[in-house]
């Protein structure tokens, strides 16, 4: 399992967690090899899109693309949906695209779990800085084949654990 903080891109064969999603988008591309995730901060721009697309294209599991998801507070604006469609087009992906609406009542932990490398389940719960953003859940940041920073400076730490207690199902809608 990999956890992606703001501005991070990563891959895992089974699960991706997104700590503290509020105004960001938790984006997940399902491929026949697993899940690619991007914790998109702010608006999508060419540099951010290129970082994600290149990460997928250059990764050993960036092959057959099955589904594209995003999760964020609320139903998403037309601009948010257009960003996903732009990412899909640049990836040469023409399959289904889904939006998962998260509670708008504050920051959320979002968890994507691979299902047979065809789709994924999405669960979430309220984020708690005092309980979740603690030293025991983090280590010094290490980039590698399955983790990269999309924009800005490298993070000092990365999450290695976040409790899954209290996760509830989120049902995305096709856009």
Image (cartoon, grey):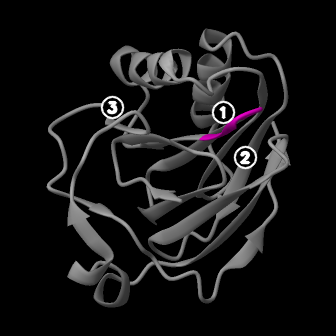
Judged from the image, the secondary structure of the residue bearing numbered disc 3 is loop
Question: Is there CB contact under 8 Å for labels 2 and 3?
Answer: no
What label does residue 10 carry, if any?
Answer: none
Secondary element at tag 1: helix
Q: Which residue is mark 1?
A: 81
Q: Residue 10 at what x, y percent from top left?
A: 46, 41
Quick one: label 1, few (<14), some, or many (20+) residues within 10 Å?
some
Quadrant where the C terminus lies? top right
Q: Which residues are magenta?
A: 31-35
Q: What x and y, as percent, mark residue 20? A: 41, 66
Tag 3 or tag 2, which sits nearer the N-term? 2
Q: Quarter of the image holding residue 67?
A: top right
Q: Which residue is mark 2?
A: 99
Between 158 and 25, the one lying in front of the other is: 158
Residue at position x 51%, y 47% from top?
25
**Residue visible at 23% across and 66% down?**
139
Q: Which residue is mark 3?
A: 150
Left/right of residue 10 with respect to residue 72 in the rendered view: left
Relative side of 115 to 79, left or right: right
Q: Are marks 1 and 2 in contact (CB under 8 Å)?
A: yes
Residue 123, horizontal then vertical, whole percent: 69, 69
Q: CA distance from mark 1 to mark 2?
A: 8 Å
**C-alpha separation, residue under disc 2 versus residue under disc 3:** 21 Å
Q: Is residue 152 magenta?
A: no
Residue 32 covered by magenta stretch: yes
Q: Give whichever of 154, 49 is nearer the camera.
A: 154
Mark 1 or mark 2: name the one nearer the start of the chain.
1
Residue shown at the point (21%, 80%) measured from the top left: 135
Up-down relation of residue 58 to residue 128 (above or below): above
Residue at 83 percent across and 49 percent down: it is: 173
Kindly state the secondary structure of the residue where label 2 is placed: strand
């Amino acid at each position: 399992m990999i956890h992606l903080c703001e501005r991070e891109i990563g891959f895992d064969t089974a699960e991706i967690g997104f700590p503290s999603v509020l105004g960001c988008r938790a984006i997940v591309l399902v491929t026949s090899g697993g899940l690619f995730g991007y914790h998109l901060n702010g608006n999508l721009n060419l540099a951010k899109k290129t970082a994600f697309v290149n990460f997928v294209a250059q990764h050993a599991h960036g092959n057959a693309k099955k589904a594209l998801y995003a999760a964020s507070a609320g139903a998403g604006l037309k601009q948010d949906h257009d960003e996903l469609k732009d990412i899909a087009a640049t990836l040469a992906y023409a399959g289904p695209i889904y939006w998962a609406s998260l509670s708008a009542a504050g920051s959320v932990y979002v968890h994507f779990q691979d299902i047979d490398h065809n789709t994924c389940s999405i669960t979430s719960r309220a984020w708690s800085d005092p309980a979740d953003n603690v030293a025991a859940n983090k280590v010094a940041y290490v980039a590698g084949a399955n983790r990269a920073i999309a924009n800005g400076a490298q993070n000092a730490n990365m999450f290695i654990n976040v409790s899954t207690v209290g996760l509830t199902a989120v049902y995305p809608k096709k856009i």
